[in-house]
Amino acid sequence: TFMQQMAQSGAAQYMDCVGLHYNEGILSPSAGSGDPRGSYPTYYFGSMLQRGYGPFGGKPVCWTELGYVTPQGYSTPLSAGFAWGQNTTVAQQAAWLAEAATLSAQSGRVRLMIVWNVDFPSPAGDDPQGKYAMLRPDGSCPACDTLGAVMRR
């Protein structure tokens, strides 16, 4: 509804791109169904891309926050509000970030992709933001390798 209302108000004439966040995924970016939480469009890369691109007459999308949360490598589980990402592995995070970059480039609809996040340290308490980080607590960065390979193509 918000996107439709923005489009109807003429927002497209004032934007270079449509800023979107995609950070609720627990499946491959090529998946269009199968999320146990349901079919809400923010759960799927493709429907989220269409949600931003469709209403604005072809304005490109700028992913201003794209990431996959994984608790792997941390001693604490995800907080209850992020429990949906509890089973995502670091390997999946790495593969899915690379796949999202590839799909974005191939779509012809994406102008920019900012990964959330690269090296956010894990704060104390229930804050899950560090668990989105590509750089893991042990210093490894599997997503650096997968994204690097995609970006060299």
Image (spheres, helix red, strand yellow):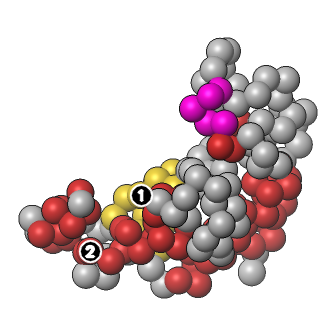
Q: Is residue 98 left or right of residue 139?
A: left
Q: Nearer the viewer, mark 1 or mark 2?
A: 2
Q: Is residue 84 rendered magenta in the image?
A: no
Provide the residue designation for mark 1.
20
Is 126 rendered above or below residue 63? above
Furthest residue toward top: 124
Is 51 rendered above or below residue 72? below
Dots 1, 2 in contact, CB < 8 A: no
Q: Position of residue 10 (x, y in %)?
A: 11, 69
Provide the residue designation for mark 2.
55
The boundaries of the magenta stretch are 79-83
**Quadrant, the N terminus:** bottom left
**In the rendered structure, which amino acid carries the disc numbered 2?**
Pro
Toward which corner of the image does residue 35 lie, by quadrant?
A: bottom right
User: Is residue 16 visible to us here?
Assistant: yes
Q: Residue at x 75, y 54 (%)?
A: 93
Q: In this rendered view, identify the residue nearer to me: 75 or 32.
A: 32
